[in-house]
Amino acid sequence: MARPARVPRGEHLFRPPEVCRRLFFMAQGLVRSYYLFDDKEVNLRLICDGSAVLPLTSLVTQQPAQEHIQCLADCEGWWLPLDDMLRPATAAAWEPLRRVLAERHYLSMERRLLTIQYKSAAQRWRYFRQTMEPRIVAETPALHVASYLGVTPESLSRIKHGPAGA
């Protein structure tokens, strides 16, 4: 049964080595998904209002999550346990939700891959502004946008304030 929740900015929804057995349906908020590489946080996804938030790989494999999911703003939504989705006897009824989760996750990760495929930081920034939800562009701290784009915060600042940032 879904239960309402309010999660404050800075709190984590998921952390390794948690195994995903629930999802957070975020009615309102802003979160980032990241992993650690050489003690550096690398942002994978930026997610806002109206989204299901979970470490999908952990749900699919039922292995410990490798990604952290942290609130960048106060978040409101519902925690939904996924025990029924994982039981063979009831899994078929959950197939439409699983498909939607997989499709949205795929599209998010494809957008991330396309973003980092651009050669210059200015091209990455332009693609980010064109394809991301307006709330993500407007409210995500520059440090996290830079990580998502694979550039330094200083480079992002120069791009945003230079001719390419317009």
Image: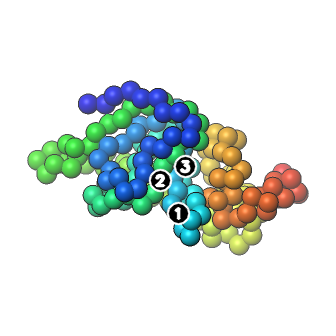
The tag earlier along the polypeptide, 2 or 1, is: 1
Q: Are marks 2 and 1 in contact (CB under 8 Å)?
A: yes
The image quadrant that residue 74 belongs to is top right
Name the residue located 79 percent from the left edge and 60 percent from the top edge: 154
Number of the label disc, if any, that sits on residue 36: 1
Residue at the spot of label 3: 32
Label 3 vs 2, first from the N-terminus: 3
**What is the spatial separation of the Cα atoms under label 3 and label 1, in whole angstroms?**
13 Å
Horizontally, residue 157 falls left or right of residue 134, namely: right
Q: Are marks 3 and 2 in contact (CB under 8 Å)?
A: no
- Residue 30 located left or right of residue 151: left
Disc 3 packing (10 Å; few <14; some 14–19; many ≥20): many
Q: Position of residue 118 (x, y in %)?
A: 67, 69
Q: Secondary structure at mark 3?
A: strand
- Return the residue at label 2: 68
- Against 37, residue 107 (above or below) is above
Q: Residue at x 26, y 43 (%)?
A: 82
